[in-house]
Amino acid sequence: MGLLPLRRPTTKPLRGANNERKVTPAVTERTLVLIKPDGVQRLLVGRILARYEERGLKLVGLKLVQVDRDLAERHYAVHREKPFFNSLVDFITSGPLVALALEGPNAIAVLRATNGATRPWEAAPGTIRGDLALEVAQNIVHASDGLDTAATELALWFKPGELVSYEREIDRWVVAPAD
Ligand code: RTP
Ligand code: MG
């Protein structure tokens, strides 16, 4: 499930009774993140997870997986014709990885921005790839790139019962209340 019916964009006027500007609430999304085998081998799992948690994203799924070729090829099916496809599948199956399902307002865009540009030398400092990676083939993390891919990838990596919905006390400080 990429898009949750927890909150929806407001259909109310953008200006309140006193003409103050109203902010359109963000849509709550779920997305898939992988901490790839290089992240696991380099002992970066805890630090990467901390970045996502500190950002305010809610962890709704988490597991360590030794990926088989079939799942790897399905996950990267969009790249099947690319010259790097085989090495990409080799790499993602070369050791255990950590699969995460994360939830929050605009989670898909937030995760892409937090991870940084695909090519680490183009990734801004402060992003995971900009701080921790040098090579495109070993760029530590994956995040779904849209609502449709998030839904497809979450279904690929997690069974429905492995995703957990729960309340967090801190969300009144992290997530703005709906109108
Ligand atoms: P990801 O899917 O892992 O989140 O990365 P992305 O969206 O930023 O990049 P994408 O274009 O989807 O590429 C998937 C992964 O393939 C590897 N890659 N290698 N050798 C190359 O030119 C090349 N280009 C991409 C990267 O590991 C990239 O994350
Ligand atoms: Mg991608």
Image (cartoon, rainbow, N blue to C red):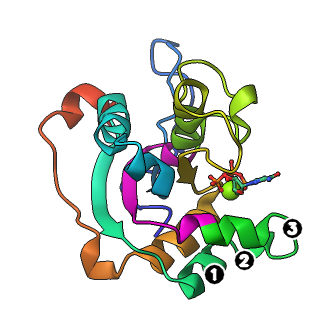
Residue at the (23%, 26%) spot, across then down: 173
Numbered disc in front, either 1 or 3: 3
Confirm or deny contact between disc 1 and disc 2 (CB under 8 A).
yes
Q: Could you say which is closer to the camera, residue 32 or residue 132? A: 132
The residue beneath circle 3 is 82
Secondary structure state at the residue bearing disc 1: helix
Return the x and y of residue 50 as percentages of the image width and height: 30, 34
Residue at the (55%, 37%) spot, across then down: 115
| Mark 3, other Cα within 10 Å: few <14 / some 14–19 / many ≥20 | few
Confirm or deny contact between disc 1 and disc 3 (CB under 8 A).
no
| Mark 2, other Cα within 10 Å: few <14 / some 14–19 / many ≥20 | few
**Residue 77, numbered circle:** 2
- Gap between marks 2 and 3 measured at Cα: 10 Å
Confirm or deny contact between disc 2 and disc 3 (CB under 8 A).
no
- Gap between marks 1 and 2 measured at Cα: 5 Å
Secondary structure state at the residue bearing disc 2: helix
Return the x and y of residue 81 as percentages of the image width and height: 87, 74
The residue beneath circle 1 is 74
Q: Which residues are magenta?
A: 91-108
Q: Check mark 3 vs ligand 1: CB closer than 8 Å? yes or no.
A: yes
Going from the N terminus, do you reach mark 2 or mark 3 first? 2
Return the x and y of residue 3 as percentages of the image width and height: 49, 61
Look at label 3 and name its amino acid.
Lys
